Amino acid sequence: MRDQDDMMRRGIGMTSQRTRERLIQRLCEEGVTNPRVLDVLRRTPRHLFVDEALAHRAYEDTALPIGHNQTISQPFMVAHMSEVLLEDGPLDKVMEIGTGSGYQTAVLAQLVERVFSVERIKVLQDRAKERLTELNLRNVVFRWGDGSEGWPALAPYNGIIVTAVAPEVPQALLDQLAPGGRMVIPVGAVGETQQLLLIVREEHGFSRRVLGAVRFVPLLNGTLS
Ligand code: SAH
């Protein structure tokens, strides 16, 4: 069974080599320029982050369902958010809110020193953990909890990335941003216009840059086992 699984993975890997390259080309056309980000997207097997039944669509530039009403983020969004986060230089401590499938987590783990990833749905988190172990990405720690509270015990973070939309930027996340730290977060309401923001902690207060219109699933309260 194990062998069969491995063959399946390799098989998908091989047949998708061209498809993967096409995705990278598309990301370039859409304006992603950071070569490290592009390289990490090229190397990260997105088909392992979705159900086998959807694996053949893994290298399309779209969000896909991962169960529990959640989606794996669109590759462009993952690349774009990572690129913006890294725009000012390397980062050592990054907190991610909304682990989901773990795809964005896996990408970040290859771009920054340490990732602290918070997810409210336990089963999604467990599966994401397994995938990252399988890919031998060891610089990630996970927390099951409500990400609107962040992860105060390990704060501050040089980078914060939020992959679910809230009506406003949660104060706890602003509080946990290190001086000079950067946060990329979608803000707005579900079904309405949402905007991706870059927030930087300056010497006095925070600066905000609107990066454009986006569509994310909502940041919800509480936890779910
Ligand atoms: N980057 C993920 C996207 C997952 S969708 C991926 O590529 O797979 C957004 C995720 O945010 C979902 O898994 C959802 O359960 C999670 N989420 C929503 N509200 C949350 C909260 N308050 N705290 C932590 N995670 C939350």
Image (spheres, rainbow, N blue to C red):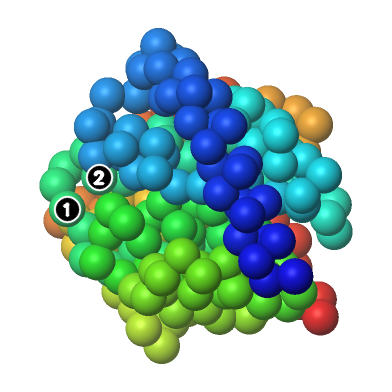
Q: Amino acid at mark 1?
A: Pro
On screen, residue 116 above or below 76:
below
Q: Work out whether residue 10 or residue 65 is closer to the camera in this orientation and state it.
A: 10
Residue at disc 2, CB closer than 8 Å to ligand 1: no
On screen, residue 107 above or below 30:
below
In the displayed structure image, the side of residue 215 where residue 77 appears, left or right: left
Expressed as whole percent of the image width and height from the top left, the position of residue 105 reads 48, 59
In the displayed structure image, the side of residue 123 where residue 148 appears, left or right: left
In the displayed structure image, the side of residue 144 where residue 26 appears, left or right: left
Q: CA distance from mark 2 to mark 1?
A: 6 Å
**Which residue is under mark 1?**
90
Name the quarter where the N terminus is drawn: bottom right
Expressed as whole percent of the image width and height from the top left, the position of residue 23 reads 49, 24
Expressed as whole percent of the image width and height from the top left, the position of residue 40 reads 34, 44
**Element marked by disc 1:** loop
Q: Work out whether residue 198 or residue 217 is closer to the camera in this orientation and state it.
A: 217
Expressed as whole percent of the image width and height from the top left, the position of residue 59 reads 59, 31
Q: Amino acid at mark 2?
A: Leu
Q: Could you classify mark 1 by the number of other residues whose Cα lies within 10 Å: few (under 14), some (14-19), or many (20 or more)?
A: few
**Element marked by disc 2:** helix
Q: Could you classify mark 2 by the number of other residues whose Cα lies within 10 Å: few (under 14), some (14-19), or many (20 or more)?
A: some
Asked if disc 2 and disc 1 are in contact, CB closer than 8 Å, the reply is yes
Q: Work out whether residue 158 or residue 166 is closer to the camera in this orientation and state it.
A: 158
In the displayed structure image, the side of residue 114 where residue 174 appears, left or right: right
Name the quarter where the C terminus is drawn: bottom right
**Numbered label tally:** 2
**Which residue is under mark 2?**
86
Q: Residue furthest bottom?
A: 153
Q: Is residue 185 visible?
A: no
Q: Is residue 143 visible?
A: yes
Examine the image and state in which quarter residue 131 appears.
Answer: bottom right
Residue at disc 1, CB closer than 8 Å to ligand 1: no
